[in-house]
């Protein structure tokens, strides 16, 4: 989208609100820092199931997920190392991830299906 102040194409969408018949996009120009909004109206209703419809398929979890980086044995090893007193930073360094993500793993907030 072009900025309405300086006509730059260097813009970013900061927020998107979806409604039944239209979508509002709140944008910011990275050159002049002005903010603007666009409204897009639909000719037909958006495709897809009605809101609140339960999913019919299983959600892939753990290492079977397509973008998984760790395997289940890695998760178990991280938790074992933490129980033995190893710091979160050293575990994160060993596995090449952030200490906050290791904290989520060892506190069963991520990968909670693995005991």
Image (spheres, grey):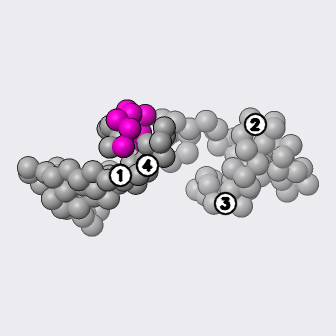
Tell me: residue 93, above or below residue 17. Answer: above
Quarter placement of the C terminus: bottom right
Which residue occupies 23% across, 53% down? 39
Q: CA distance from mark 1 to mark 3?
A: 41 Å
Q: Earlier in the sequence, mark 1 or mark 3?
A: 1
Q: What residue is pinned by disc 1?
A: 36
Mark 2: which secondary structure?
helix
Of the two numbered discs 3 and 4 on the same chain, state the one appearing first in sequence: 4
The answer to whether residue 77 of the structure is visible from this angle is: no
Q: Which residue is mark 4?
A: 34
Q: Which residue is mark 3?
A: 108
Is 19 drawn above or below residue 79 in the view shown? below
Residue sitting at x 15%, y 59%: 21
Q: Is residue 50 left or right of residue 113?
A: left
Residues under numbered marks 1 and 4 in contact, where contact means CB atoms less than 8 Å apart: yes
Residue toward you, 109 or 30: 30
- Highlighted magenta segment, given as a residue range: 5-12
- Helix, strand or loop at mark 4: loop
According to the picture, the residue beneath numbered tag 2 turns out to be 95
Residue placed most toward the observer, 13 or 106:
13
Mark nearer the N terminus (1 vs 2) = 1
Q: Nearer the viewer, mark 1 or mark 2?
A: 1
């Amino acid at each position: 989208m072009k900025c309405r102040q300086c006509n730059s194409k260097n813009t970013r969408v900061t927020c998107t609100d979806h409604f039944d018949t239209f979508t509002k996009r709140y944008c910011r120009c990275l050159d002049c820092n002005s903010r603007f909004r666009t409204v897009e109206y639909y000719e037909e209703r958006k495709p897809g199931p009605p809101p609140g419809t339960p999913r019919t398929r299983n959600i892939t979890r753990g290492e079977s997920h397509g973008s998984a980086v760790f395997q289940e044995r890695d998760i178990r090893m991280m938790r074992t190392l933490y129980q033995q007193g190893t710091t979160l930073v050293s575990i994160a360094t060993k596995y090449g991830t952030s200490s906050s993500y290791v904290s989520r793993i060892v506190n069963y907030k991520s990968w909670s299906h693995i005991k």
